[in-house]
Image (spheres, rainbow, N blue to C red):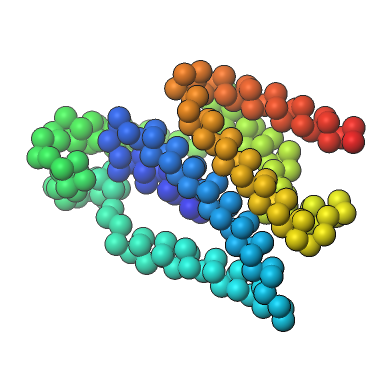
Amino acid sequence: MQLQSVPVYLSEMAPAKIRGALNIGFQVAITIGILVANFVNYGTAEIKGGWGWRVSLALAGVPALFMTIGSIFLPDTPNSIIERGHHEEAKRMLQKIRGTEIVDAEFEDLIAASEAAKKVQQPWRNMFLPRYRPQLVICSLIPFFQQITGINVIMFYAPVLFKTLGFGDKASLMSAAITGVVIVVGTFVSVATVDKFGRKALFIEGGVQMIICQVSARHH
C-alpha cells in the first residue's frame, strides 16, 4: 500500500522543481530500509533460545509504529481537498506547504486539472481505447515482467534461497545483507546518472543486465 500511496502523496505535496528528487529519495529510503533489516536479521540471529526471530519481528514493528502515528499528523493534499469541493481550504493548505501567499497560478492549475478530470466520461472504458493502448501496454507489462523475473523472491526470501544453495545460517543472512548493499549502491548509481543519461537509457541498461543475469543463472 505504501509503495502506491507515498509517491502520489509526495507528487501532490512537493513543488515541481523537487518532485522528482523526493520520489527518488523515497526509493533510496526503501533500499536502505531493506539493507538495515538484513543486518538486523543477521545480528538477532546470534540471540539464543529461539528469541532471535522474535526480536527481529518486534523491531520491524518500530518503524511501522512511527509510520502509523506520523500519518495521523500528515496534512491532506490540496488536490484531494479540491476534489472534495473545499477550494478555500485547499488554497490555504497550498499556501502553507509552499510557504508563500503567492500561489494563485498553481492553484488555478490544480482547479483546472480537477475540472478536466471530472469531465471525463467512463474513464475505465476510455483506458482501453486504441489511442491509449501504448500507455496501457507499457504500464501493465513493465511491472508484470518485473515481478515474473522473481525479484520478490530475492528481496523477501534471500536467506532461505541462499540456504537452499548450501549456505549455512549465518552465511545465508550475510549473503542477504550483501545483496542489500548491492541494491543500495545500484540505487545511488541510478540517482547519480538518471539526469545525465535519461530514464529510458537506464531502463534499457537495467533490462540488459537482467537478461544477462537470468541467462547466466539458467546455465549454472
As displayed, is residue 141 above or below residue 83? above
Figure quadrant of residue 219: top right
- Left or right: 122 with respect to 98? right
Residue 59: x and y in percent read 54, 69
Q: Position of residue 133 (x, y in %)?
A: 57, 24
Q: Residue furthest bottom?
A: 49
Residue pictured at 38% horizontal, 39% vertical: 22
Q: Nearer the viewer, residue 206 or 192?
A: 192
Which image quadrant is residue 145 in? top right
Left or right side of 193 for 170:
right
Residue closest to the eye, 113 or 57: 57
Q: Position of residue 217 (x, y in %)?
A: 83, 36
Residue 157 visible: no
Q: How many marks?
A: 0
Say which quadrant the C terminus sits in. Answer: top right
The front one of 116 and 92 is 92
**Please, which residue is most extreme toward the right here?**
219
